[in-house]
Image (tube, rainbow, N blue to C red):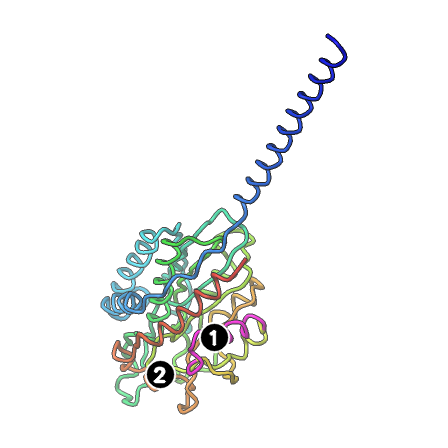
Amino acid sequence: MSYKSFYSAFCLTGALFMLTACNTSNTTNSSETNNALVRIPTPQFNADSAYLYTQKQVDFGPRIPNSAAHAQCASYLSSELTRLGATVIVQEAELRAFDNTLIKAKNIIGQFNPEKNNRLLLFAHWDTRPFADNDPDHSNYNKPIDGANDGASGVGVLLEIARNIGLAGHNMGIDIIFFDAEDYGQASHLNMPYMEDSWCLGSQYWAQNPHKKDYSARYGILLDMAGAKNALFYKEMNSMQFAPQLNKRIWDTANRLGYGNQFIYENGGHITDDHVYVNKYRRIPCVDIIQHDPTTNSSFGSYWHTLDDTMENVDRGTMKAVGQTVMEVIYSEE
């Protein structure tokens, strides 16, 4: 082979090598681009769907622990989360109530993308109050309540969010937990000394015995009384202590979406709710989106813990405001 032929062959080989190297580099970059997470647009929250999820729970009757309605609703919630695409765990525990009743509690946990470590937590309580101890008629004190807003509405909103996650997907792990025995706290009409931590028994248990060892989440959002007509949501003060930046972000998001008439930039009270124990035992920063009514003695709606907590108090517009806000927050995560 002459020098010229050798040189030509060398140049051709070099050119092929460079072309191959360039193609390999392009393939690698393309692969890396394809593997990058693409932001999923925020789905549209369907208030009619959330309302029907709420109605379905109320149709079982008061969901008091140890009752038939409680067992039937637990089965419905776990099967519905499964149908919507979640991996479901029903955490069962025997818990002692303030009056020494042994409660057979069920925390219902729906996991989306359970293999992912980077997680968000959404939660509400699904049980109802055994006592209408805030009813204006004292003869109703020992009667159970329907809990349409106080319990069912928050669960209804989260089921609709679960439906959207199942359809659209999400880049992070999402856990939706329905806590039990939140509303079996000390009855105000009974002459008993004050008992610390008699409320939120299900979340207290889970927070100390999570479904996954060393469970953690970036943050948690609690929905409680999330569906009443003309409900106002002030900034709950424990939430401001636990997660001030998340609290601001939620309220800013709600106002940007046009729900500023319900998400008010004013401080509410310190509420002992499930988020307190999730923060206390799991150190997860949590915000409680909970109705605040400054015109009532309880600071909640007039229906609260009365026989009037029925579907007549539940409003699709309020559920839309809460649900769309929460979805916009979680779908803006990266």
* Sequence-first tag of 2 and 1: 2
Which residue is nearer to you in this view: 101 or 161? 161
Regarding mark 1 in the picture, which secondary structure is present there? helix
Residue 243 percent coordinates (x, y): 57, 71
Q: Are marks 2 and 1 in contact (CB under 8 Å)?
A: no
Depth check: give the residue in front, 281 or 50: 50
Looking at the rendered structure, the kind of residue marked 1 is Arg
Occupied quadrant, residue 177: bottom left
**Can residue 242 be seen at all in this image of the molecule?**
no
Which of the two residues, 8 or 151, is positioned nearer the viewer here?
8
Callout 2: SS:
loop
State the residue at coordinates (56%, 53%). Answer: 214
Quadrant where the N terminus sits is top right
Q: What residue is drawn where x is 40% and y is 52%?
A: 89
Q: Quadrant of the C terminus?
A: bottom right
The residue that appears at 56% across and 62% down in the rendered structure is 282
Q: Which residue is mark 1?
A: 256
Residue in the image at 29% along x and 80% along y: 313
Horizontal and vertical percent for residue 112? 43, 52
**Is residue 247 covered in magenta?**
yes
Pinpoint residue 47: horizontal percent, then vertical percent.
Answer: 31, 69
Q: Residue furthest right?
A: 3
* Image-quadrant location for residue 72: bottom left
* Rendered image: mark on residue 230: 2
Q: Write the start and end of the magenta stretch as one range.
A: 245-262
